[in-house]
Image (tube, rainbow, N blue to C red):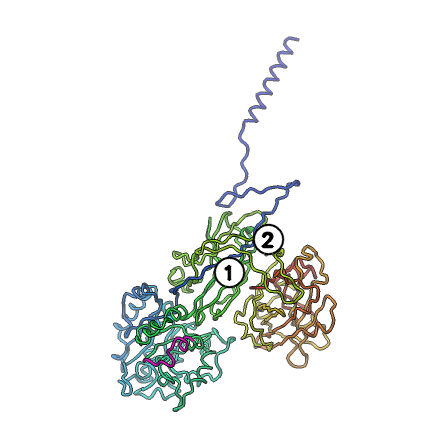
């Protein structure tokens, strides 16, 4: 028995040692992640499920800069008599981004341009680029004088010179702001031609056509006299035609005796008659979308008072003005105290007013961003310019903001609301969120001197050319967002966090509330903002009184909520853009739909034709979690008809309301070459007692519906909330529609 007991004790010791050995071994490590920063710890609830992180919707405001901002393709400029290499950076240091120069070809009136001269021009382009500038060009053959000018060249020689200059224009288009038509007559100003070209419409047309071919299709040509432009195109350029690359869309205006007499020294003289009012009315439309600039040429006090000069620059959307001439006019503005205002407002001046985005977002989801800015300049940015959001933190991501064209930012307020797909491979951590408007040319894109700077303190990242809105956190955990709580004021030089103010009520029974409304998640689709309207639009299907149009665009396959995306024929098959607006009495909607087959069938239900569908939850907080529509959820339909036998129609599908309330809804439609446009006014009285405006936000979804067959049917819908189409009447799947301030 002693032997057996000994064995048992020995076995017990061995087992104990084995247990200790196992316990002391290192444990297997967790699988490595692809992030470059440590993952955030995710708290767990009682069941072990991940608890979402709570984030606020940051409502940030920004402080304007008091002075001028040196921005591309705008402002006062200096002038040169011949385009030759120079230290153009000197002029940037003087506070300008533009220079003007003639290309002097007086030595080549009857022969080809020499290679030496062409090399000089190329060297000058290189110097402009090195100096961070852009140039406005005009070719001339003389310096006048008037009325007995030195010779210009023949039409044949001019066309040959344009052919020689074309490779230089194409190669260096990145630093060409635009080109003046030039060539003809004294100083290339289209008068006093020794070959009578200024009296020959066919010659003028030939030179314009040749220049248009020599330049890239996105570069403008400025004409000296408005009546040449009006003769070519009697109807002024429209918003729909703008930036299309057609010849009319590329023609602007330059005035080399701006504000210098009652006719601007012959600029507005037509056969001995001063037609300044008629020409100004025409040009005020054109110059919304094409450049207007020039120089003064003599003192003329009636039009050069501060009030008169600024009014004319506002009317004609003045982009650039010669600092070198006439110097006394410039001095007079300086003495009168308006030079600084003119300097700041020439061209565009974009002032960031507000931005809204969450303090945290989940990687791989949609980030909703709303920005409100004001263009305080005389004009908009006119050359093409991409628009990006930048996330800069543990990694840097550049996210294109599709469907937003800064060339449409005319003077006034603009609200930009968009959803960004956060990269699935983004590392967790804190990021700066910035807006970036670089030059589109690859040669200049990463040069911050060519990026647009907002006129605000504390936002400009000079080394990158970014406008930094603020910071946020990206995490892999789920995120729930709510409105921001009130914050104490920040310093003037930094963005300040504030609660977005509640819009004024639109009905006497509505009482503003202080509690923020809950919001639908960005993953539902496209968040939207209704622009506050000081003047209601005229309902006629003409969207020219919607200066921010288009605000939002539906043109992607992932936005198709009904029908087979594989059968979608692209944007020409079904797509559209739209804007929301509001005032104290009503909600407004403007839209333009692209549809290659327009259907308005007799005897069909409204929804079996092409139409626009809108859902509105006018008491979002009242039943936020309710998954079935009820009395505060309104479904509208607006059908254009066939613009022939089938009339347009609008209705409220649900809830049941009186015919008088339905009849108070107004709409108008217009046929376009590739679809239709429309405008809608929905008075707030339509919603009756269900309306709660105090929240400042509605639930909303908008869809364009398509039927391409010759029978009643609903074939496809493209929507702001594509996931809601298959679950009819479920408000939790809709978007947010904020009433902008």
- Label 2, secondary structure: give it: strand
Return the residue at label 2. Answer: 482
SS under mark 1: strand
Query: From what the image shows, is residue 691 above or below residue 137?
Result: above
Residue 102 shows up from this direction = no
Which image quadrant for residue 683?
bottom right
Residue 635 x %, y %? 69, 66
Task: Please tell me which residue is depicted at 43% across the width and 60% down the height of the picture.
Answer: 456
Residue 552, percent from left and from top: 56, 66
Instruction: Report the residue marked by disc 1.
Output: 354
Residue 444 on the magenta span: no
Q: Is residue 304 magenta?
A: yes
Q: Which residue sits at x=59%, y=67%?
A: 580
Residue at the image position 70 percent from the left and 57 percent from the top: 627
Between 387 and 14, the one lying in front of the other is 387
- Looking at this rendering, what residue extends furthest in the bottom direction? 272
Q: Distance between the Cα atoms at labels 1 and 2? A: 18 Å
Where is residue 187, by image quadrant? bottom left
Is 654 left or right of 240, judged from the image as shown? right
Span shown in magenta:
298-310
Above or below, 654 against 540 in this view is above
Occupied quadrant, residue 82: bottom left
Please state if 495 lies on the left or on the right of 563 as rendered.
Answer: left
Position in image of residue 400 (x %, y %): 49, 60
């Amino acid at each position: 028995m002693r032997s057996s007991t000994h064995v048992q004790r020995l076995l017990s010791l061995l087992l104990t040692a084995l247990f200790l050995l196992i316990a002391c071994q290192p444990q297997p490590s967790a699988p490595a992640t692809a992030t470059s920063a440590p993952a955030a710890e995710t708290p767990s609830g009682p069941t072990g499920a991940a608890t979402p992180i709570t984030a606020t919707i940051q409502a940030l405001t920004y402080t304007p800069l008091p002075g001028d901002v040196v921005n591309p393709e705008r402002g006062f400029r200096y002038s040169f008599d011949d385009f030759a290499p120079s230290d153009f950076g000197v002029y940037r240091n003087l506070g300008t981004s533009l220079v003007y120069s003639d290309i002097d070809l007086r030595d080549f009136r009857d022969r080809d341009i020499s290679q030496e001269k062409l090399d000089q021009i190329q060297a000058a382009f290189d110097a402009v680029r090195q100096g961070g500038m852009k140039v406005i060009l005009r070719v001339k053959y003389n310096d006048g004088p008037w009325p007995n000018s030195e010779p210009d060249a023949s039409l044949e020689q001019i066309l040959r010179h344009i052919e020689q200059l074309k490779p230089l224009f194409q190669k260096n288009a990145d630093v060409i702001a635009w080109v003046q038509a030039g060539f003809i007559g004294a100083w290339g100003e289209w008068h006093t031609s020794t070959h009578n070209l200024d009296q020959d419409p066919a010659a003028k047309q030939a030179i314009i056509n040749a220049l248009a071919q020599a330049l890239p299709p996105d570069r403008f040509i400025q004409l000296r006299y408005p009546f040449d432009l009006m003769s070519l195109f009697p109807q002024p350029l429209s918003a729909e035609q703008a930036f299309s690359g057609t010849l009319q869309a590329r023609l602007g205006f330059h005035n080399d005796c701006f504000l210098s007499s009652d006719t601007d020294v012959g600029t507005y003289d037509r056969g001995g008659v001063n037609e300044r009012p008629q020409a100004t009315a025409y040009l005020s439309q054109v110059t919304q979308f094409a450049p207007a600039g020039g120089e003064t040429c003599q003192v003329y006090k009636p039009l050069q008072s501060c009030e008169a000069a600024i009014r004319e620059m506002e009317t004609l959307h003045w982009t650039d003005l010669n600092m070198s001439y006439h110097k006394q006019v410039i001095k007079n503005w300086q003495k009168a105290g308006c030079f600084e205002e003119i300097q700041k407002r020439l061209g565009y001046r974009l002032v960031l007013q507000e931005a809204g985005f969450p303090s945290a977002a989940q990687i791989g989801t949609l980030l909703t961003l709303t920005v409100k800015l004001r263009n305080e300049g005389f004009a908009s940015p006119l050359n093409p310019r991409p628009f990006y959001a930048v996330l800069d933190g543990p990694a840097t991501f550049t996210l294109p903001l599709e469907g937003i064209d800064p060339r449409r930012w005319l003077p006034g307020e603009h609200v930009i609301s968009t959803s960004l797909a956060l990269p699935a491979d983004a590392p967790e951590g804190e990021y700066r969120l910035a807006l970036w408007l670089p030059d589109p040319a690859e040669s200049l894109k990463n040069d911050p001197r060519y990026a647009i700077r907002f006129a605000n303190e504390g936002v400009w990242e000079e080394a990158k050319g970014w406008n930094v809105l603020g910071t946020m956190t990206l995490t892999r955990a789920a995120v729930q967002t709510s409105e921001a709580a009130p914050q104490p004021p920040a310093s003037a030089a930094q963005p300040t966090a504030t609660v977005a103010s509640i819009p004024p009520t639109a009905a006497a029974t509505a009482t503003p509330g202080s509690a923020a409304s809950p919001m639908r998640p960005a993953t539902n689709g496209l968040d939207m903002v209704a622009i506050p309207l000081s003047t209601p639009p005229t309902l006629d299907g003409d969207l020219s009184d919607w200066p921010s149009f288009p605000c939002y665009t539906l043109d992607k396959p992932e936005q198709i909520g009904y029908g087979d995306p594989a059968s979608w024929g692209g944007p020409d098959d079904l797509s559209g853009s739209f804007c929301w607006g509001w005032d104290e009495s009503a909600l407004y909607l403007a839209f333009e739909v692209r549809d290659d087959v327009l259907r308005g069938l007799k005897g069909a239900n409204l929804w079996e034709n092409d139409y626009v569908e809108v859902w509105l939850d006018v008491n979002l907080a009242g039943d936020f979690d309710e998954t079935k529509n009820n009395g505060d959820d309104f479904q509208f339909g607006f059908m254009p008809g066939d613009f022939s036998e089938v009339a347009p129609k609008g209705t409220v599908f649900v809830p049941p309301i009186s015919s008088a309330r339905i009849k108070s809804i107004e709409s108008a439609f217009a046929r376009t070459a590739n679809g239709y446009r429309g405008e809608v006014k929905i008075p707030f009285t339509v919603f009756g007692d269900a309306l709660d405006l105090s929240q400042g936000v509605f639930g909303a979804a908008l869809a364009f519906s398509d039927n391409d067959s010759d029978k009643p049917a609903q074939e496809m819908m493209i929507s702001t909330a594509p996931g809601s189409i298959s679950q009819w009447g479920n408000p939790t799947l809709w978007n947010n529609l904020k009433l902008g301030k």
